[in-house]
Image (spheres, rainbow, N blue to C red):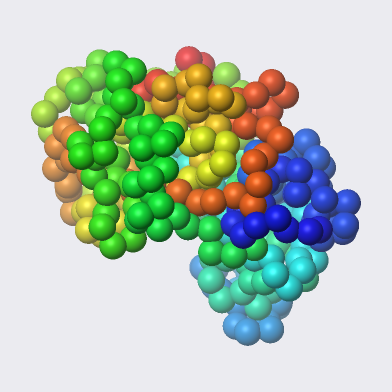
Amino acid sequence: MKLKGGGVIPAQMIWEMIDDGEIKETSRDNIQPASLDLTVTGQIYRMKGTLLPQKEEKIIDIIEKASLYPADISQPLELNGIYLIKLEEELALPSNIYASSNNKSSTGRINLQTRLLTDGGRRFNKIQKGYHGSLWLEVVPKSFLIKLRPGDHLNQIRFCSTNSRISEQELEEIYKEYQLLYDNQGRFIPLDKVWIRDYDGTLIMTVNLNQEIIGYKCSSRNVILDYSRQDFYKAEDFFEPIIGPKSELVLKKGEFYVLSTKEFIRVPPELAVEMMAYDVSSGEFRSHYAGFFDPGFGYGRNGEIKGRPAVLEVCPYDSDFILRDNQPICKMTFEKLTEIPIMTYGESGLNSHYKGQIGPRLSKHFKM
């Protein structure tokens, strides 16, 4: 595979990686504009706890040391149980390609935590340059009992050739050129009205409490959610709607909430976005599990869409937290692509479940 520039690798180059044997045991149907959906198998183990491998240690050795028993994937995963599942895909990356992984939106919105592990990989969700080997997924249901099936896609992977992040100066130029944020009335938000971190090139977005339904709070934990079922469940059997508008919302420690941003974000085809999962400067809560926004989200192919709100999965950690309307809630990092992808988010033929989302939309499993 010949790289035309540094950054995130788009769909057509992921195809090349599959053809060249650098990504094995996958399907082209799993390719997104700048990422690849990963596939769970039926090989699953219930673990004593979370454990990262030491240098050169294989995941199968960790399973021998720290597993309780081989689990049955046909049975629901228990609440807060820690599982390791082998993924279908294997990698034989060239020496100049590395990768990162994150939840898919549909797992984040049901509070199903996933983290990728590799042989000898001493960090979750990070795959070093030139990695050859299998992929494993740590899966922890945090709100519901989850039933999985072989073939389900819980997380996604993004491949990069160099540091892909946009600098502060580049972000300001790109913001003006592509008009990256709009309000809910379809009006462009000028740069001087936007939060931009002056030391890491991050775009800050705020929470929206000024809407008819502010969000949803997990209301029942003793229920089973079958991950393969789409447009199937009633929201009220799992979540309690939070009626607005409100000037502030008290988030209870340990509870799970689905909220949305006040701003509508646009991701032009030349770029991708990662939402950072946790920012202690914004408060002691996690504001997102899923992290990848593919090229074209809230933008379309030619800029015909005036943004979409980001949906947030929020869980306070240390104490109750009072969240106020228009308070900073998440930060977005824009990334360069090596070239424009041949497809964009929401185009026909792609499983773009959230292309038209407005407000705090629940996962694809729930009837709208």
Q: Quadrant of the N terminus?
A: bottom right
Q: Is residue 291 above or below residue 163?
A: above
Residue 77 screen position, x and y as percent: 58, 47
Residue 155 screen position, x and y as percent: 60, 47
Residue sitting nearer the eye, 13 or 137: 13
| Residue visible at 82% across and 50% down in the picture | 16
| Residue visible at 54% across and 51% down in the picture | 336
* Any part of residue 256 in sight: no
| Residue visible at 21% across and 53% down in the picture | 283
Residue 176 screen position, x and y as percent: 36, 37
Q: Which of the 4 image quadrants contains residue 259?
A: top left
Relative horizontal placement of residue 83, taking residue 40 as reference (left or right): left
* Any part of residue 21 in sight: yes
Q: Is residue 185 above or below residue 316?
A: above
Residue 330 screen position, x and y as percent: 32, 46
Q: Is residue 308 above or below residue 98?
A: above
Taking the view exactly as shown, the residue that stands out farthest to the bottom is 55
Relative horizontal placement of residue 51, taking residue 142 as reference (left or right): right
How many numbered marks does the figure carry?
A: 0
| Residue visible at 65% across and 24% down in the picture | 347
